[in-house]
């Protein structure tokens, strides 16, 4: 666990989560003191601290170090896996992020883009907002010619409850700069993704 993740983990009120989980178990007719459930409130508290660790982190710090480079063509980081928690039902959604930008004289380390996606995902989220947050941050911090973000995800709030449609996926996009103003740029990005 990184120092920043450990700090985020420590800022969670574990005792309060444990008490709430005990109450939920009682409310659904379970015995929170039985063998299989005895440690569940503690496990759930630790899980929430981990999957929501992005709440107290600034993903922008990953874009603070850039490098001068005279490259003005599209840079794409494909298939970045992410897991998030839908804020409507507190159920997970998981998928892949595809992030592209056209540098304007500055580039950033490849892993930094994946870190930005991960930290924004580790919050109560909706996929639409997550797409925009990643695009907006790259647009503001790198000042590129353009940014494109596409997220593909499966939502358990749709596959295991409600309409129960396993196999369905949601695609969202957020485009800035030349990805928004130039159809060819957006089409080139989508063609690299196979869409």
Image (cartoon, rainbow, N blue to C red):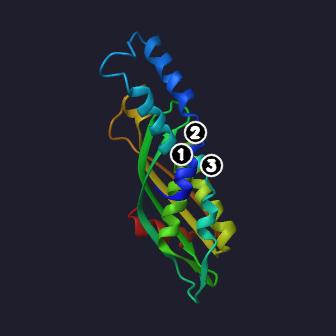
Measure how far apart labels 2 and 1 are at the Cα level: 6 Å
* Labelled pair 2, 1 in contact (Cβ < 8 Å): yes
Q: Residue at x 64, y 75 (%)?
A: 144
| Rendered location of residue 76, percent (x, y) | 47, 72
Looking at the image, which residue sits at the far bottom? 70
Q: Quadrant of the C terminus?
A: bottom left
* Residue placed under numbered mark 1 in the picture: 9
Q: Residue at x 57, y 84 (%)?
A: 72
* Labelled pair 3, 1 in contact (Cβ < 8 Å): no
Give the crowd class for mark 2: few <14, some 14-19, many >=20 residues within 10 Å: some
SS class, disc 2: loop
Q: Quadrant of the N terminus?
A: bottom left
SS class, disc 1: helix
Looking at the image, which residue sits at the far top? 29
SS class, disc 3: helix
Vertical comparison of 150 with 71: above or below: above
* Residue placed under numbered mark 3 in the picture: 56
- Which badge, 3 or 1, comes first in the chain's sequence? 1
| Rendered location of residue 60, percent (x, y) | 63, 63
Q: Is residue 74 visible?
A: yes
Q: Which mark is residue 138?
A: none
Measure how far apart labels 3 and 1 are at the Cα level: 9 Å
- Which badge, 2 or 3, comes first in the chain's sequence? 2
């Amino acid at each position: 666990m990184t120092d920043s993740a450990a700090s985020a983990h420590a800022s969670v009120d574990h005792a309060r989560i444990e008490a709430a989980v005990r109450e939920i178990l009682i409310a659904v007719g379970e015995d929170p003191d039985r063998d299989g459930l005895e440690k569940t409130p503690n496990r759930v508290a630790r899980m929430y601290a981990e999957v929501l660790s992005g709440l107290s982190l600034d993903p922008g710090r990953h874009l603070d170090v850039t490098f001068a480079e005279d490259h003005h063509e599209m840079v794409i980081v494909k298939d970045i896996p992410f897991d998030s928690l839908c804020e409507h039902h507190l159920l997970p959604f998981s998928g892949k992020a595809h992030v592209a930008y056209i540098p304007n004289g500055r580039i950033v380390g490849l892993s930094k883009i994946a870190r930005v996606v991960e930290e924004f995902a580790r919050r109560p989220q909706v996929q639409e907002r997550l797409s925009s947050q990643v695009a907006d941050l790259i647009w503001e911090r790198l000042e590129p010619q353009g940014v494109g973000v596409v997220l593909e995800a499966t939502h358990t709030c749709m596959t295991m409850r409600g309409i129960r449609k396993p196999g369905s996926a949601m695609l969202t996009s957020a485009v800035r700069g030349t990805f928004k103003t130039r159809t060819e740029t957006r089409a080139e990005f989508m063609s690299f993704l196979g869409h």
